[in-house]
Amino acid sequence: SMSAPKEPAVAEQEAMATTGTGFEKVRGIFAPFGATLAGAASVAAEKAKEVGGVVAERSSSISVPDTFKNVSSGDVLARVKEGAAGAADVVRRGSMTVREDLRSKMKGTAVFGVDLNHVLRRDGNVLTVPRVVEKCTTYLEERGMDALLLFQLAAKPAQIDAFKKVFDLDDLAADLSGCGDPHLIAQLLRLYFVELPDSLIPVTLHDQFLAAELGETPEADMAKLIVQLPDANLSVLRHMLRFLNRIASEAGRHGANARVLAVAFGPAWMRGRNLQALVFDIPVVVRVVDRMIQRQADLFKMVDEAAQAQAQAAIAEAEGEGEAAE
Protein backbone atom coordinates (compact mmCIF):
# COMPACT_ATOMS: atom_id res chain seq x y z
CA SER A 1 0.00 0.00 0.00
CA MET A 2 1.13 3.56 -0.62
CA SER A 3 2.37 5.52 2.38
CA ALA A 4 0.87 8.88 3.24
CA PRO A 5 2.81 11.89 1.97
CA LYS A 6 5.14 13.37 4.51
CA GLU A 7 4.60 16.77 6.04
CA PRO A 8 6.70 19.46 4.37
CA ALA A 9 8.59 20.16 7.59
CA VAL A 10 9.47 16.48 8.03
CA ALA A 11 10.58 16.14 4.43
CA GLU A 12 12.71 19.25 4.75
CA GLN A 13 14.37 17.92 7.92
CA GLU A 14 15.13 14.59 6.23
CA ALA A 15 16.57 16.36 3.22
CA MET A 16 18.79 18.49 5.43
CA ALA A 17 19.93 15.40 7.33
CA THR A 18 20.81 13.68 4.05
CA THR A 19 22.68 16.74 2.86
CA GLY A 20 24.52 16.88 6.15
CA THR A 21 25.61 13.29 5.77
CA GLY A 22 26.91 14.08 2.29
CA PHE A 23 28.94 16.98 3.60
CA GLU A 24 30.41 14.77 6.32
CA LYS A 25 31.61 12.32 3.66
CA VAL A 26 33.17 15.11 1.63
CA ARG A 27 34.80 16.50 4.77
CA GLY A 28 36.28 13.08 5.48
CA ILE A 29 37.76 12.87 2.00
CA PHE A 30 39.46 16.23 2.35
CA ALA A 31 40.49 15.79 6.01
CA PRO A 32 44.23 15.54 5.17
CA PHE A 33 44.01 18.98 3.64
CA GLY A 34 42.13 20.53 6.57
CA ALA A 35 44.70 23.13 7.51
CA THR A 36 45.05 24.39 3.95
CA LEU A 37 41.31 24.49 3.44
CA ALA A 38 40.80 26.29 6.75
CA GLY A 39 43.28 28.97 5.74
CA ALA A 40 41.67 29.36 2.34
CA ALA A 41 38.24 29.54 3.96
CA SER A 42 39.42 32.31 6.27
CA VAL A 43 40.71 34.37 3.36
CA ALA A 44 37.52 33.69 1.41
CA ALA A 45 35.42 34.82 4.38
CA GLU A 46 37.25 38.12 4.59
CA LYS A 47 36.83 38.68 0.86
CA ALA A 48 33.17 37.77 1.14
CA LYS A 49 32.68 40.44 3.81
CA GLU A 50 34.23 43.04 1.55
CA VAL A 51 32.09 41.99 -1.40
CA GLY A 52 29.01 41.79 0.83
CA GLY A 53 29.52 45.36 1.95
CA VAL A 54 29.73 46.58 -1.65
CA VAL A 55 26.65 44.58 -2.63
CA ALA A 56 24.70 45.93 0.35
CA GLU A 57 25.55 49.49 -0.61
CA ARG A 58 24.48 49.03 -4.23
CA SER A 59 21.54 46.64 -3.86
CA SER A 60 19.06 49.49 -3.43
CA SER A 61 19.88 50.75 -6.91
CA ILE A 62 19.41 47.37 -8.56
CA SER A 63 15.98 46.74 -10.06
CA VAL A 64 14.75 43.21 -10.65
CA PRO A 65 12.97 42.77 -13.98
CA ASP A 66 9.27 41.96 -13.62
CA THR A 67 9.89 38.73 -15.53
CA PHE A 68 11.84 37.29 -12.61
CA LYS A 69 9.88 38.67 -9.65
CA ASN A 70 7.37 35.82 -9.51
CA VAL A 71 9.67 32.94 -10.47
CA SER A 72 9.41 30.14 -7.92
CA SER A 73 11.93 27.46 -7.06
CA GLY A 74 9.63 24.98 -8.75
CA ASP A 75 9.93 26.90 -12.00
CA VAL A 76 13.70 26.89 -11.70
CA LEU A 77 13.71 23.13 -11.04
CA ALA A 78 11.51 22.53 -14.08
CA ARG A 79 13.91 24.53 -16.26
CA VAL A 80 16.85 22.56 -14.91
CA LYS A 81 15.07 19.28 -15.69
CA GLU A 82 14.34 20.47 -19.23
CA GLY A 83 17.97 21.41 -19.72
CA ALA A 84 19.16 18.07 -18.37
CA ALA A 85 16.77 16.23 -20.66
CA GLY A 86 18.04 18.23 -23.65
CA ALA A 87 21.64 17.52 -22.76
CA ALA A 88 20.88 13.82 -22.37
CA ASP A 89 19.28 13.80 -25.81
CA VAL A 90 22.36 15.41 -27.36
CA VAL A 91 24.57 12.77 -25.73
CA ARG A 92 22.24 9.98 -26.86
CA ARG A 93 22.21 11.19 -30.47
CA GLY A 94 25.96 11.68 -30.38
CA SER A 95 26.54 8.13 -29.17
CA MET A 96 24.20 6.81 -31.86
CA THR A 97 26.21 8.68 -34.50
CA VAL A 98 29.45 7.16 -33.23
CA ARG A 99 27.94 3.67 -33.20
CA GLU A 100 26.59 4.02 -36.73
CA ASP A 101 29.90 5.39 -38.01
CA LEU A 102 31.76 2.47 -36.45
CA ARG A 103 29.20 -0.01 -37.77
CA SER A 104 29.48 1.30 -41.34
CA LYS A 105 33.29 1.24 -41.24
CA MET A 106 33.26 -2.31 -39.85
CA LYS A 107 30.98 -3.36 -42.69
CA GLY A 108 33.33 -1.69 -45.16
CA THR A 109 30.55 0.44 -46.64
CA ALA A 110 31.63 3.89 -45.47
CA VAL A 111 32.52 6.49 -48.09
CA PHE A 112 33.03 9.62 -46.03
CA GLY A 113 36.49 9.85 -44.51
CA VAL A 114 37.69 6.81 -46.50
CA ASP A 115 40.58 6.74 -48.97
CA LEU A 116 39.36 7.73 -52.43
CA ASN A 117 41.15 4.92 -54.23
CA HIS A 118 39.75 2.36 -51.78
CA VAL A 119 36.17 3.53 -52.38
CA LEU A 120 36.55 3.29 -56.16
CA ARG A 121 38.24 -0.12 -56.12
CA ARG A 122 35.90 -1.64 -53.55
CA ASP A 123 33.29 -2.52 -56.19
CA GLY A 124 35.72 -4.17 -58.59
CA ASN A 125 37.01 -1.15 -60.53
CA VAL A 126 33.58 -0.35 -62.00
CA LEU A 127 33.45 3.22 -60.68
CA THR A 128 35.25 6.28 -62.03
CA VAL A 129 33.94 8.57 -59.27
CA PRO A 130 32.41 7.76 -55.88
CA ARG A 131 28.64 7.34 -56.02
CA VAL A 132 28.12 10.15 -53.55
CA VAL A 133 29.94 12.53 -55.93
CA GLU A 134 28.08 11.26 -58.98
CA LYS A 135 24.66 11.43 -57.30
CA CYS A 136 25.21 14.86 -55.76
CA THR A 137 26.48 16.43 -58.99
CA THR A 138 23.66 14.90 -61.03
CA TYR A 139 21.09 16.18 -58.53
CA LEU A 140 22.54 19.70 -58.57
CA GLU A 141 22.70 19.86 -62.36
CA GLU A 142 19.06 18.81 -62.57
CA ARG A 143 17.58 20.65 -59.60
CA GLY A 144 20.09 23.19 -58.35
CA MET A 145 20.52 25.62 -61.22
CA ASP A 146 17.89 28.01 -59.87
CA ALA A 147 18.97 27.79 -56.22
CA LEU A 148 20.05 31.33 -55.40
CA LEU A 149 23.50 31.55 -53.76
CA LEU A 150 24.32 27.93 -54.53
CA PHE A 151 27.37 26.69 -52.58
CA GLN A 152 27.18 29.85 -50.47
CA LEU A 153 24.42 29.05 -47.99
CA ALA A 154 24.88 26.70 -45.06
CA ALA A 155 22.62 23.74 -44.34
CA LYS A 156 21.59 22.32 -40.98
CA PRO A 157 24.34 19.99 -39.68
CA ALA A 158 21.79 17.41 -38.54
CA GLN A 159 20.35 17.17 -42.05
CA ILE A 160 23.77 16.88 -43.66
CA ASP A 161 24.69 14.19 -41.13
CA ALA A 162 21.53 12.24 -41.95
CA PHE A 163 22.38 12.05 -45.67
CA LYS A 164 25.99 11.28 -44.83
CA LYS A 165 24.84 8.24 -42.84
CA VAL A 166 22.65 7.10 -45.73
CA PHE A 167 25.65 7.03 -48.08
CA ASP A 168 27.94 5.45 -45.49
CA LEU A 169 25.50 2.60 -44.92
CA ASP A 170 24.71 1.92 -48.60
CA ASP A 171 25.87 4.37 -51.27
CA LEU A 172 24.32 2.28 -54.04
CA ALA A 173 20.83 2.48 -52.55
CA ALA A 174 21.17 6.13 -51.44
CA ASP A 175 18.43 8.21 -53.08
CA LEU A 176 18.41 12.02 -53.24
CA SER A 177 15.20 12.38 -55.22
CA GLY A 178 13.17 13.13 -52.10
CA CYS A 179 15.37 16.04 -51.06
CA GLY A 180 13.98 19.45 -51.92
CA ASP A 181 16.96 21.52 -50.76
CA PRO A 182 19.81 21.93 -53.27
CA HIS A 183 21.85 23.85 -50.67
CA LEU A 184 21.85 20.75 -48.48
CA ILE A 185 23.18 18.55 -51.30
CA ALA A 186 25.75 21.20 -52.24
CA GLN A 187 27.15 21.18 -48.70
CA LEU A 188 27.04 17.36 -48.58
CA LEU A 189 29.18 17.27 -51.74
CA ARG A 190 31.67 19.74 -50.32
CA LEU A 191 31.83 17.82 -47.02
CA TYR A 192 32.86 14.68 -48.88
CA PHE A 193 36.06 16.37 -50.04
CA VAL A 194 36.67 18.00 -46.67
CA GLU A 195 36.65 14.59 -44.97
CA LEU A 196 38.94 12.76 -47.41
CA PRO A 197 42.02 11.44 -45.55
CA ASP A 198 44.22 13.20 -48.11
CA SER A 199 43.06 16.13 -50.19
CA LEU A 200 42.08 15.71 -53.83
CA ILE A 201 45.29 17.51 -54.76
CA PRO A 202 47.77 15.52 -52.63
CA VAL A 203 50.01 17.31 -50.17
CA THR A 204 53.05 16.16 -52.17
CA LEU A 205 51.94 18.31 -55.14
CA HIS A 206 50.45 21.23 -53.21
CA ASP A 207 53.40 23.61 -53.43
CA GLN A 208 54.01 22.76 -57.08
CA PHE A 209 50.45 23.76 -58.01
CA LEU A 210 50.91 27.07 -56.21
CA ALA A 211 54.19 27.64 -58.06
CA ALA A 212 52.52 26.82 -61.37
CA GLU A 213 49.83 29.44 -60.77
CA LEU A 214 52.47 32.05 -60.01
CA GLY A 215 54.63 31.08 -63.00
CA GLU A 216 54.70 32.32 -66.59
CA THR A 217 52.81 29.33 -68.11
CA PRO A 218 50.34 28.29 -65.39
CA GLU A 219 48.03 26.11 -67.47
CA ALA A 220 50.79 24.14 -69.17
CA ASP A 221 52.55 23.65 -65.85
CA MET A 222 49.33 22.58 -64.13
CA ALA A 223 48.62 20.07 -66.89
CA LYS A 224 51.99 18.44 -66.22
CA LEU A 225 51.12 18.21 -62.53
CA ILE A 226 47.61 16.85 -63.08
CA VAL A 227 49.09 13.99 -65.10
CA GLN A 228 51.03 13.00 -61.98
CA LEU A 229 47.87 12.61 -59.88
CA PRO A 230 46.81 9.10 -58.82
CA ASP A 231 44.27 7.66 -61.27
CA ALA A 232 41.39 7.98 -58.78
CA ASN A 233 42.19 11.63 -58.03
CA LEU A 234 42.57 12.44 -61.71
CA SER A 235 39.22 10.88 -62.56
CA VAL A 236 37.37 12.70 -59.79
CA LEU A 237 39.08 16.03 -60.54
CA ARG A 238 38.08 15.76 -64.22
CA HIS A 239 34.47 15.01 -63.24
CA MET A 240 34.29 17.82 -60.69
CA LEU A 241 35.85 20.47 -62.94
CA ARG A 242 33.40 19.67 -65.73
CA PHE A 243 30.55 19.89 -63.24
CA LEU A 244 31.73 23.17 -61.69
CA ASN A 245 32.34 24.68 -65.13
CA ARG A 246 28.73 23.82 -65.99
CA ILE A 247 27.53 25.39 -62.73
CA ALA A 248 29.61 28.53 -63.32
CA SER A 249 28.21 28.88 -66.84
CA GLU A 250 24.77 29.43 -65.26
CA ALA A 251 25.97 31.91 -62.62
CA GLY A 252 23.36 34.42 -63.76
CA ARG A 253 20.67 32.11 -62.39
CA HIS A 254 22.15 31.29 -58.99
CA GLY A 255 25.11 33.60 -58.39
CA ALA A 256 27.85 30.95 -58.15
CA ASN A 257 30.55 31.95 -60.64
CA ALA A 258 33.94 30.25 -60.93
CA ARG A 259 35.45 32.44 -58.22
CA VAL A 260 32.69 31.61 -55.75
CA LEU A 261 33.05 27.90 -56.50
CA ALA A 262 36.83 28.13 -56.10
CA VAL A 263 36.35 29.68 -52.66
CA ALA A 264 33.97 26.84 -51.74
CA PHE A 265 36.13 23.95 -52.99
CA GLY A 266 39.71 25.29 -53.07
CA PRO A 267 40.52 24.84 -49.36
CA ALA A 268 38.85 21.40 -49.42
CA TRP A 269 40.81 20.21 -52.46
CA MET A 270 44.17 21.73 -51.55
CA ARG A 271 44.72 21.53 -47.79
CA GLY A 272 48.49 21.70 -47.81
CA ARG A 273 50.76 20.60 -44.99
CA ASN A 274 48.72 22.04 -42.15
CA LEU A 275 46.04 24.57 -41.34
CA GLN A 276 48.48 27.35 -40.56
CA ALA A 277 50.15 27.03 -43.96
CA LEU A 278 46.77 26.84 -45.70
CA VAL A 279 45.70 30.17 -44.20
CA PHE A 280 48.58 31.87 -46.00
CA ASP A 281 48.10 29.81 -49.18
CA ILE A 282 44.34 30.34 -49.59
CA PRO A 283 44.52 33.35 -51.98
CA VAL A 284 46.69 31.38 -54.42
CA VAL A 285 44.72 28.16 -53.82
CA VAL A 286 41.55 29.98 -54.88
CA ARG A 287 43.32 31.26 -58.00
CA VAL A 288 44.46 27.73 -58.88
CA VAL A 289 40.97 26.23 -58.61
CA ASP A 290 39.34 29.25 -60.28
CA ARG A 291 41.68 28.80 -63.26
CA MET A 292 41.05 25.05 -63.42
CA ILE A 293 37.28 25.57 -63.41
CA GLN A 294 37.28 28.22 -66.12
CA ARG A 295 39.89 26.55 -68.32
CA GLN A 296 39.00 22.92 -67.67
CA ALA A 297 38.44 22.00 -71.34
CA ASP A 298 41.78 23.38 -72.54
CA LEU A 299 43.51 22.13 -69.42
CA PHE A 300 42.42 18.53 -69.86
CA LYS A 301 43.21 18.65 -73.55
CA MET A 302 46.79 19.36 -72.51
CA VAL A 303 46.54 16.71 -69.79
CA ASP A 304 45.45 14.06 -72.29
CA GLU A 305 48.17 15.10 -74.75
CA ALA A 306 50.79 14.94 -72.00
CA ALA A 307 49.55 11.53 -70.88
CA GLN A 308 49.66 10.26 -74.46
CA ALA A 309 53.18 11.59 -74.90
CA GLN A 310 54.27 9.88 -71.70
CA ALA A 311 52.72 6.61 -72.84
CA GLN A 312 54.47 6.78 -76.23
CA ALA A 313 57.77 7.59 -74.54
CA ALA A 314 57.35 4.62 -72.23
CA ILE A 315 56.59 2.33 -75.20
CA ALA A 316 59.62 3.60 -77.10
CA GLU A 317 61.82 3.09 -74.07
CA ALA A 318 60.53 -0.45 -73.59
CA GLU A 319 61.13 -1.25 -77.25
CA GLY A 320 64.63 0.18 -77.05
CA GLU A 321 65.42 -1.97 -74.03
CA GLY A 322 64.04 -5.01 -75.85
CA GLU A 323 66.25 -4.42 -78.91
CA ALA A 324 69.30 -3.89 -76.72
CA ALA A 325 68.62 -7.16 -74.96
CA GLU A 326 68.53 -8.98 -78.30
Image: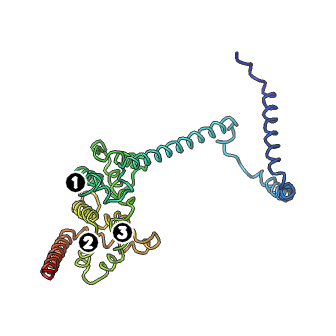
In the displayed structure, 99 sits above or below 259; it is above
| Residue 175 place in picture, x, y as percent | 29, 44
Q: Quadrant of the N terminus?
A: top right
Which residue is nearer to you in this view: 106 or 19?
106
Q: Secondary structure at mark 2?
A: helix
Which residue is nearer to you in this view: 49 or 141?
141
Q: CA distance from mark 3 to mark 2?
A: 13 Å
Label 2 near label 1: C-beta < 8 Å? no
Which residue is rendered at x = 62% and y = 38% of the image? 81
Q: Is residue 247 left or right of residue 49?
A: left
Q: Secondary structure at mark 1?
A: loop
Q: Secondary structure at mark 3?
A: loop
Residue bearing the label numbered 2: 226
Residue at the farthest top position: 1
Q: How busy is the neighbourhood of tag 2: few (under 14 within 10 Å), some, or many (20 plus)?
A: many
Residue at the farthest front position: 326
Please name the amino acid that badge 3 sits on: Met
Which residue is rendered at x = 57% and y = 43% of the image? 87
Residue bearing the label numbered 1: 126
* Mark seen at residue 172: none
Q: CA distance from mark 1 to mark 2?
A: 22 Å
Which residue is rendered at x = 23% and y = 69% of the image? 294
Residue bearing the label numbered 3: 270
In the displayed structure, 5 sits above or below 41; it is above
Which residue is rendered at x = 43% and y = 50% of the image? 157
